[in-house]
Every structure is written in structure tokens, then in C-alpha cells.
Amino acid sequence: MTENNETLNKGRNAQWRVELRNSVPNKDRVALERVKMTEVEPHERIKSQVCEVNCGLTAEQAVTEARRCMDCVTPTCVEGCPVNIDIPRFVKQIEAGKFLDAAATLKEYSALPAVCGRVCPQEKQCEIKCFYTQKMKKDPVAIGYLERFAADYERQSGKIQIPQVEARNGIKVAAIGSGPSSLSFAGDMIKLGYDVTVFEALHEIGGVLKYGIPEFRLPNSVVDVELENLKEMGVNFEKNFVVGRTASFDDLKELGYKAFFVGSGAGLPNFMNIPGENLNGVMSSNEYLTRVNLMYANQSDSDTPVMLGKRVAVIGGGNTAMDAVRTSKRLGAERSIIIYRRSLEEMPARVEEIKHAMEEGVEFMNLANPVEYLPDTTGRVAKARLQRMKLGEPDASGRRRPVPIDGDIVELDVDLVIVAIGVSPNPLIPACLPGLKMTRYGTIEVNEETMQSSVPEIFAGGDIVRGGATVILAMGDGRRAAASMHRYLQEKYAKK
Amino acid sequence: MNKIIEKYNLSEHVAKFVIEAPMIAKSRKPGNFVILRIGEKGERIPLTIVDSDIEKGTITLIVQNVGVSSGKLCQLAAGDFITDLVGPLGKATHIHKAGTILALGGGVGIAPLFPIVKAFKQAGNRVLTVLAARSKDLIILEKEMREWSDEVLVMTDDGSSGRKGLVTEGAEEFIKREKVDECVAIGPAIMMKFCALTTKKYDIPTQVSLNTIMVDGTGMCGACRVTVNGETKFTCIDGPEFNAHQIDFDELLQRLRAYKNEEDQAKNKK
Ligand SMILES: Cc1cc2nc3c(=O)[nH]c(=O)nc-3n(C[C@H](O)[C@H](O)[C@H](O)COP(=O)(O)OP(=O)(O)OC[C@H]3O[C@@H](n4cnc5c(N)ncnc54)[C@H](O)[C@@H]3O)c2cc1C
Ligand SMILES: Cc1cc2nc3c(=O)[nH]c(=O)nc-3n(C[C@H](O)[C@H](O)[C@H](O)COP(=O)(O)OP(=O)(O)OC[C@H]3O[C@@H](n4cnc5c(N)ncnc54)[C@H](O)[C@@H]3O)c2cc1C
Ligand code: SF4
Ligand code: FES
């Protein structure tokens, strides 16, 4: 961090920054109101699964918002960002109208800024650490919106810089899975001159960015541009390839692969194991979202069906639950209800997601937990029996533990139940590598700094290491793994 | 994209495909399946790998035309391409020397049964096979089955081939005649349910291969859940083969009907 502080300071003392800082007095900066994101009206947007809700900032809005940032001596926002993006630098570049430079700054730290600007929980990361939030009890600088603005500006300008890649060194490496951790790993390794192949089990590249997060929050086109860039830089993509099944690690080694990055995610959906959970009409959020986002089941020319519900209950309070419940609204549900066992304040979903869901007419039943599902005569779910809860003592996570209120059980009419109570690590890779050291949660054990596993040539990151986490953490892992795999391979092969 | 090398129609509704897939040909084991997709808006459907040729780099699939996606596949010919094909998926069958194996195949279930019969025979077992279907034209792979079984009994509902009667009657005939050590049954869920009830009576350990609805086939969605011994399992990664005597078949039958309306609509539309 101290090293980072030095670089931050050096940048801050650049002449253009000093001039920009002095050009507007702080009291004028502070007087500006935080920009409001333009959004498509709720009644309009719920007609479409692909209509992005947030419209993005105009250049004028972005410059004004950037002006609010006081370019602090100690930029605490940077500490809040899991990959320590030099936030004041890119924000000031926006203020100065140098939008492409701002995008370049972001790219130094994050492989997919257009994605992070849209899906990061900024209110818990950079923005909560902003001087405005911390010291002035005011709305923080809209760092996330600005990040998205810079990345979108670059993409839409058609002037995306394809990073320089070093001369090929002939060393083959593989990334397993094509989620954000693998994509950022692949981007760094190709720049360093390696021969990189990304293997993906599904028929689409992108991991959760494609099959999980819906278009109305993250358009596929945003991800596709990044994938095109990686292809142009020389990254190989092998779809429909399950490492450990289609070919084993040994097979891949025989094909010349010298090291592996496992970014296979936390794909396995959890269920509650309560009576009636296997009834028709009860499914995981992964199944629901995959049918819609990956298989386009909501479109009439798709061969994949998806169950539609008039009264949809979604169990859980995370981003996945919000994505599922908002999708159900868009697919025509009359009632879409979140059922969460804690209170609204404790929901792990991004604040913006909860707000958008409420605007769209999603109902929230907090402090309730399903205990059983009952069928109609055809065997489809018809009722959910819910246990009412109250908040008790704080638990290990510091949140107040929900405890059942004795005998307080209510019945809710439903015809579709979507279970979004979390995911477990994908067991495919561990199952085929008995030598790999695992934690008791089924995640791969790695050295936190190098991301190296107990098998020296295997590195890992993202959700397979952290359990269900975030896009930015997955990307950070991929980058750290690339840097340390590079050191490992150089020691082993280069100087011979 | 995988190229179709050969295609044969085994009957009006059943086709056999030999498909280029060198990696899968090499790594697949009896009991494994693939998931494939035809066209950019196609559905992912699971099909058992019936056979493979490592040298030619091909796998063999046999598919019965029962709906939209299987129908699309059946329309393809040699030289055409499969849009997406992934595998081998699922756990392989536990092949070992058990003594006498009773293999029960119903309808298109005969296809996935074939690699298992072959492997058990190669492992030195005595293999008794019952092939059953509604009528003659749904009995497939009879010649191949005879090649790898010690005895084959054909049963049809209407008596148009072999003996008239149900698969369970054929099974009991063998069981009553000689000692059977293990049983494998593959076919429609209802057939497997009754096979399981029959072998349970005689205390014969029995494996079945379940044809649940699937989406990804990698454990990601849970569409394929099934209750085994009171616990929820995912057919695509924990199966597809399970101990027949522990399966909740009624739930399985119910779940197979989950998309009945949508399937019927789709079929009528096309
Ligand atoms: C619905 C939903 C909404 C979310 N919303 C947010 C959000 O708003 N903000 C946020 O920060 N995070 C969010 N997350 C979490 C975030 O998406 C994940 O933390 C992140 O995607 C993890 O990235 P990853 O690189 O570990 O891999 P993943 O994105 O999980 O991708 C892993 C890929 O590996 C493939 N794979 C697995 N095994 C193999 C194998 N053996 N061979 C080949 N391929 C394999 C899988 O098919 C998959 O495509 C959300 C998650 C979901 C499900
Ligand atoms: C592990 C596994 C291996 C399989 N192996 C083979 C195989 O080798 N050859 C083969 O022909 N089929 C096999 N199946 C079944 C095959 O996947 C389905 O027949 C196919 O998905 C039907 O798709 P469709 O769109 O053509 O029909 P749909 O329109 O989806 O369904 C049409 C009719 O078929 C029934 N049906 C739907 N899905 C299934 C299913 N999974 N099993 C049985 N009936 C179903 C429906 O109830 C409906 O009546 C296998 C299934 C699994 C899970
Ligand atoms: S990556 Fe996320 S946490 Fe970091 S600055 Fe951007 S929005 Fe904030
Ligand atoms: S098919 Fe999705 S988990 Fe088995």
C-alpha cells in the first residue's frame, strides 16, 4: 500500500492535476449535488428483459460529477476499491475532458471497467470510503457511474486501445472457465507473451456475466466487446470443453500446457432441503436465469422453455435473488415477491438493485423463511408455507440472527418459486485432481498473495477460491495469479 | 461445431449418428453422455454415448425423435454440423466382474444400455439381456446386443417381434431360471420403476440410468434433481446411474412432466 501511495502522490503532483485542483475552490465543488443517473421508467423497462435500466451519464454530467471530487491528499476511496484503482486520477481526467485517458487509467487496474462500473457494489467499496461519505455525511462522488462513463465512452468512440502484446514466448498456459477471473488472467498473460487458451464448459464465453447477470443490468454487447479485444490480442477460446472431462490435466500437459489457472466459479446452487422443494415450479435461480439469459427461453424462437409464473416467490436477498425477481416481472408475473429471512437493511444485494426492484413493483416479505411447499392437483407448486422470524442476537457475521417466532406460520399462494440462497464451489475440477488441497468449504486452497495452489503449476482465483464473491475480486485474483504464474514460469523455463 | 460422419435410420423414429469428436471419443467411458445443441436458438439436450472409435475420432449417438430438439437432430444428415457438443458428462458406470448381469433395455433406453452390456461382457461377466419396446420397429441394436450378450430375449407389447409381454416378465423368467448377481435397467422412467420393483423382490442390486430434464449438465442449475435415498442428487454430476431401489420414481415421473405443456405447444407449432 505504501508503494501505491507513492505512485498516487506522484500522479497527484503532476502539473495538470495541480492546476485543475486550483482552478475551482473546494467550497464550490462541495456545493454541487451528486448527479442522478437517468433511468428508463419502471413501467417501460419491465416490458423488456434486454432494456438496460441505467442510461449512463452524458459527457456534461460526467464532467460536473467529476468536479465534485476534491482530489484528496489521502484518497481513501482507493483503499475501498478491492484492486486499488487510482480513482482520483481517472476522475480528474474526466474533469479535464480527457475521457480516453481516464479509460486507459482504469484499464491499468481492471480488465473490464465497463462491467465493474455497472455491477460493483460501490456503496460498500470505493464510495463508502469517499471523503464526502466519511467526513461530510454527504452523497459520495459517483465513482461507479464515472467508471462506467469512461469505459463506455471509449467503447462507443470506436477507439478502444488494443494493448501491446510482447513477442510470443512459446509457453502454453490454460485458463479454466471463462468468468471474470479467467478473462483478466488471460488478458495479462497474453500481454506478457504467453500462448493462452481459455476453456469453457458452456457454449458461451463469459461465465456469470453471460448466464447469470441479466441484460437489463449488464448488456451482453458490453462483455462481447471485451471478448473481441482478447481474441484480437491472440487469446484462444475453446467452448464446449469441460476440463477434467473432455480432457484431463494430464492430457493438457501432454498437449504442452505448462501451467493452469482455475477460475471455474461457484456454480453449484444450494437448496434448503425442505419438503416440496422438488415440486415442479420450484427451481434454482441459476436454472431460471440460465434458461432466460443463456438459452433465451423468453423469446418465441428459442427451443428452450421456461416456466412462467403469475405469483412468483424468490427466496433470498442477494444480487441473484434481485436478478431473478426482476426477471420474473419482465416475463409477466402479476406478483413478484422477495422472501428473505432477515430484514431489509441486512440484504446483501446492491442497494441500487433493491431500489430498482422496488420501483418495478417487486414486493418484499422480510423476516420470513419457507419451511414447506405444497402442490396443486397436477403436482405443481401452489403454496409456500412461511415461518415468520424476528431478529435476535448478532451472529458471527455481525448481523442480527433471525430466529423463528414460534407457531407463526403463514401460507402464500405461489405458482413459481425460485431458490436463490447461494451457491457452492463447482466440484468438477477438485473431483478430478485428488492432489489438490481444498478447504472444508470445498474451495481451492491457495496462497493469498500468489494464488498458487498446493499443486505448483495450478493457480486459482474467483469464486472457486472465495465462494460466491464479486466480479471485481475475481478480476483482481486473475491478475495476481497472472503476475505470479509469470514469475513461476520464468524461473522454470525462460532462462534455459 | 462437430461434423456428422455417418447417419443411419434405425427405424422411422430412431436414428444413429457417427459424429466427429476426437477428444470425447478418447476420454469417454460407458455410462457417459454428451449434451448437444442444434442451431443458435437450440435447446441443450443430453444423449448417451453409445460407442466410440478412438482411431477415427468419432462417437456414436442414437436418438429417438420425441420432440422439437430430437426432431431437429434427426433431420440432419452426414456432412452436416452439430452446433455445440460437449462431454463426456456424468459418472461412468462401475464396470466390474460380478458374475451374471441382467441387462434390461426399454425402447430408446436400449441405446444407452448397449455400451454397458459390452463393457460388462468384456469384463468377463455372463450377460443376459432383455430388449423390450411397444413394437418391432422400436427394437434397436438387436444384432449388436446379441454379439455382446450370452442370451437375448426380445419382448414387445404387441408381439410383433420376439415374445409378447412386458420387460419385467422377461426379467423374471431369467431370474427364476438362474442366479443373477446384478441388474442394469435403462428405459422410460415408468419402465425403470417397475424393473426396480421386480428386482427388489429378489434382492438383486440394480442400477438405472435416469433421463431427467437437464440444462447445462455440469451441476450448475439443478434441473436434473432427483431424490435418492431421501437425499436430493443432481443426475448430471452425481449420476446418471443410481441404485434403483433408492430412487423416488414417482417424483421423477412428476418432474419429467414439468414442461409438458410447453413441449406440446412447441411440437404443434413446428
Ligand atoms: C445472478 C448473479 C448476479 C450477480 N451479480 C453481481 C453483481 O452485481 N456484482 C458483483 O460484483 N458480483 C455479482 N455476482 C457474482 C459474480 O458474478 C461472481 O463473483 C463472478 O462472476 C465470479 O467469477 P469467476 O471468474 O470465479 O467465474 P464465473 O463467472 O463463476 O464463471 C466460471 C465459469 O467456469 C466454467 N467452468 C466451470 N468448471 C469448468 C471446467 N471444468 N471446465 C471448463 N469450464 C468450467 C463455468 O461454466 C463458468 O462459465 C453475481 C452472480 C450471480 C450468479
Ligand atoms: C443422461 C441422459 C441420457 C439420454 N440418452 C438418450 C439417448 O441416448 N437417446 C435418446 O433418444 N434420448 C436420450 N435421452 C433423452 C433425451 O435427452 C430426450 O429425449 C430429449 O431431450 C427430448 O428433447 P425434445 O426437445 O426432442 O423433446 P421434448 O419436446 O422436450 O419432449 C417431447 C416428449 O419427450 C418427453 N421427454 C422429454 N425429455 C425427456 C427425457 N429426458 N427422457 C425421456 N423423455 C423425455 C417429454 O415428456 C415429451 O413427452 C437421455 C436423457 C438423459 C438425461
Ligand atoms: S472497481 Fe469497483 S470498487 Fe473499484 S473504483 Fe470501480 S466501482 Fe469502485
Ligand atoms: S443439468 Fe443442470 S445441474 Fe444437472
Image (cartoon, coloured by chain):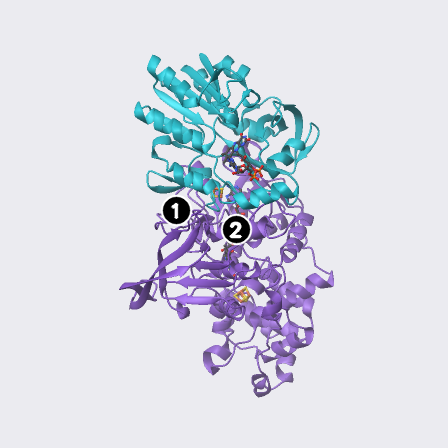
- Above or below residue B82? Residue A2 is below
Colour of the chain lettered A = purple
Residue A405 image-quadrant placement: bottom left
Chain identifier of the residue bearing label 1 in the image: A
> Taking the image as drawn, is residue A207 in sight?
no
Name the quarter where the C terminus of chain A is drawn. Answer: top right
- Residue B237 appears in view: yes
Chain letter for the part of the structure drawn in cyan: B
Q: At x 62% / y 68%, what residue is drawn?
A: A44
Residue found at x 44% / y 16%: B121
Residues tagged 2 and 1 counted as in contact (Cβ below 8 A): no
Which residue matches tag 1?
Answer: A442
x, y percent for residue B211: 48, 35
**Is A437 placed above or below B209 here?**
below
Tell which of A7 and A172 is nearer to you: A172
The chain identifier of the residue carrying mark 2 reads A
Q: Nearer the viewer, mark 2 or mark 1?
A: 2
The mark that comes first in sequence, 2 or 1, is 2
Disc 2: which residue:
A307
